[in-house]
Image (spheres, rainbow, N blue to C red):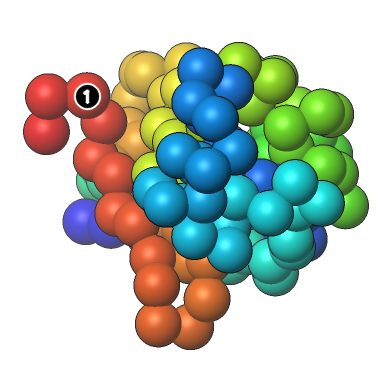
Amino acid sequence: MFITRRIDFSASHVCRNPGLSQEENQALYGPEANPGGHGHNFVLEVTLAGEPDPVTGMLYDLKALKDILHQEIVEPFDHRFLNVEASPFDRVVPTTENIAVEIWSRLAPRFADPPAKLHRVRLCETEDLWVDYFGAGA
């Protein structure tokens, strides 16, 4: 069984590889490489997999999940310029793909054991662009 919780956060970033020139970054990332950055209202869906507890009937306590997402994702990312204020994006290009991987790495240790395992991170940058990440090697 799967259960999914959705949260949102607003953050700005610039897609820029410091090892490339501004011209190369512009050619690679287009307007996303604008040095002033740009922002998004990200929507994050986190899906857990497992079996409901026979006593509670719940796969996972949704209030606890909300609290974990707030602590691990919203607090460090919301209303932040990711390249400057959120590690590892001072050294990793904060593409939607890389942000999804970082979110997974922050959440996976919290769901490594039963009753629930982290199944999927879906990060929506816009309503028509998102990344699904199922962990390394998936």
* Identity of the residue drawn at 37% across and 19% down: 112
Q: Is residue 112 left or right of residue 127?
A: left
* Identity of the residue drawn at 69% across and 66% down: 40
Q: Quadrant of the C terminus?
A: top left
* Residue 96 shows up from this direction: no
Q: 114 or 4, which is in the foreground? A: 4
Q: Quadrant of the N terminus?
A: bottom left
Q: Farthest bottom residue?
A: 127
* Amino acid at pointer 1: Ala
- Give the vertical position of 60 relative to 107 (above or below): below
Residue linked to disc 1: 136
Mark 1 neighbour density, 10 Å: few (under 14) some (14–19) many (20 or more): few
- Element under label 1? loop
* Identity of the residue drawn at 60% across and 50% down: 33
- Give the vertical position of 29 relative to 136 (above or below): below
Q: Is residue 53 left or right of residue 23?
A: left
Q: 24 or 102, which is in the foreground? A: 24
Q: Is residue 105 left or right of residue 70?
A: left
The image position of residue 10, as x and y in percent, is 77, 61
Q: 67 or 93, which is in the foreground? A: 93
The image position of residue 48, as x and y in percent, is 36, 46
- Give the vertical position of 97 relative to 39 (above or below): above
Q: 118 or 86, which is in the foreground? A: 86
* Identity of the residue drawn at 24% across and 40% down: 134
